[in-house]
Image: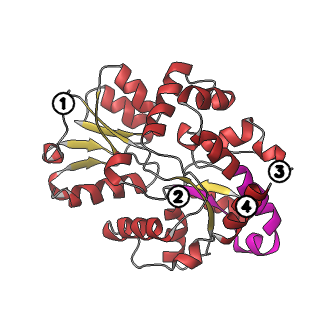
Amino acid sequence: MEPFHSVFYAPHYVALHLGHFTAEGLDVTTRTGAGSTSTTRALIDGSAQISLGGLMRSLDLADRGGRLLPHFAEVNSRNGFFLIGRQSRARFAWPEIVGRTVISFTGAPTPYQSMRTVLRREGVNTARVTFVRDLAPADAVTAFRAGRGDFIEVGQPTAEMLLDEGFHLAVSMGDATGPVPFSSYMTMPDRLRHEPELIVAFTRAVYRTQRWIATHDAKAVAEAIAPAFADIPRPICERAVGRYLAQGTWARDPLLRRPGYEYLVDILLGGGFIQRRHRYQDLVDTALAERAMQTLKEG
C-alpha cells in the first residue's frame, strides 16, 4: 500500500518493473490508498502486508498509544517537495517569505512541519507567514494558478508542470531540510518475527534497486517507471526524476539510521505533531536490512 501514486516513490516502481521483486520470488501488487493514514490502516486490518510511507505515521500512532508499526527499509532520504513562487529571483532568501501567503501541501503533515523547522532555523518567525492548509492538493494547485497565494509547496511532477507554465522555483525543500528518512517500508511486528525471510527477500530487491538507480541517469529511471506513470509526459517525468536524483532524494541502501530518525522526531516535536520522543528501536528494525545487504553482497 502506498499513500499516493508519485514519482517520489520511483524506487518502488523500478523494483517492480525491472523485475527485482520477481527475482526474489515475490509477486507484488501495489495499491494506492486515500491519503497517508491508509498505509497504517491497511497493515492493521490485514489488507496489506507491507506499506510505503512516512515514519511520522508510526510516530503518530505510538504517540496516541496505538500499535507499534516498525519501518525496515528506507526509500526516500530527502524531503520531496518544492517551494514554487510567482517571481523570478536570482537567489531566494527565507526572509522574503515574511508577510507572504504559502499554500501548503495538505496530503501529509511532514512537508509542513519540515517547512516550519527550516523557517525557525533561518530565524523566520512562522507566525509572520500565512499558511493556507484547508485545500486538497489538486485544489491547492488550481487556486495557485488562479492567483491565490504567493508561494505553493508541491511535489513532482506538479513542480515541473508549474515551472513549464512560467512559475519559478524558490527552493527545493529537500535541500533546505537536509537528509531525513522521509519515506520507508513498514510492516507489523509479527511479520518481522514470523516471516523474516519474506522481509529479507523484499528488502534485497529494494537494495538491488537502490544500487541500480545509483548507476543510472534520469532517462533510464524515467524509462523504467514509465509503465506506472503513463499519464505523465516523458520529458516532464525525466526532469522530475533528474531533479530528485540531483539532490540525493533516494536512499543508497535500506538502512534507516538513528541520526535521521532523531532529526525527524525533532521536526515533529518542534511543530507539535507529536508530544514525546519515541525509542528508535521500537519503530525501526535494521537487522533484516543488514541481512539483505549481506546476502546480496555474497550472491
Look at the picture and state if 117 lies above or below 95.
Answer: below
The one nearer the camera, 164 or 151, is: 164
* Badge 4 element: helix
Helix or strand or loop: what does disc 1 sit on? loop
Of labels 1 and 4, the one closer to you: 4
Q: Horizontally, is 280 left or right of 160 in the view?
A: right
**Mark 4 closeness class: few <14, some 14–19, many ≥20 residues within 10 Å:** many
Residue 270 sits in quarter: bottom left
Reading the chain from its start, which is encountered first: label 1 or label 3? 3
- 273 vs 48, left or right, is left
Q: CA distance from mark 3 to mark 4?
A: 11 Å
- Can you tell which of label 4 and label 2 is closer to the viewer? 4
What secondary structure characterizes most of the magenta part?
helix
Q: Which residue is mark 4?
A: 292
Percent coordinates x, y for residue 123 in the rendering: 15, 58
Q: Residues within 10 Å of mark 3 (few under 14, many from 20)?
A: some
- Near mark 1 (Cα within 10 A), the count class, few <14, some 14-19 or many ≥20, is few
Secondary element at tag 3: loop
Question: Identity of the amino acid at label 3?
Answer: Glu
Q: Is residue 28 visible?
A: no
Q: Earlier in the sequence, mark 2 or mark 3?
A: 3
Q: The residue tagged with tag 2: helix, strand or loop?
A: loop
> Could you give the CA–CA distance between mark 1 and mark 4, rounded to whole angstroms?
46 Å
Residue 54: mark: 2
**Number of marks drawn:** 4
- The span picked out in magenta is 183-206
Q: Amino acid at mark 2?
A: Gly
Q: Which mark is residue 24?
A: 3
Residue at left offset 18%, top offset 30%: 89
Between disc 2 and disc 1, whose residue precedes?
2
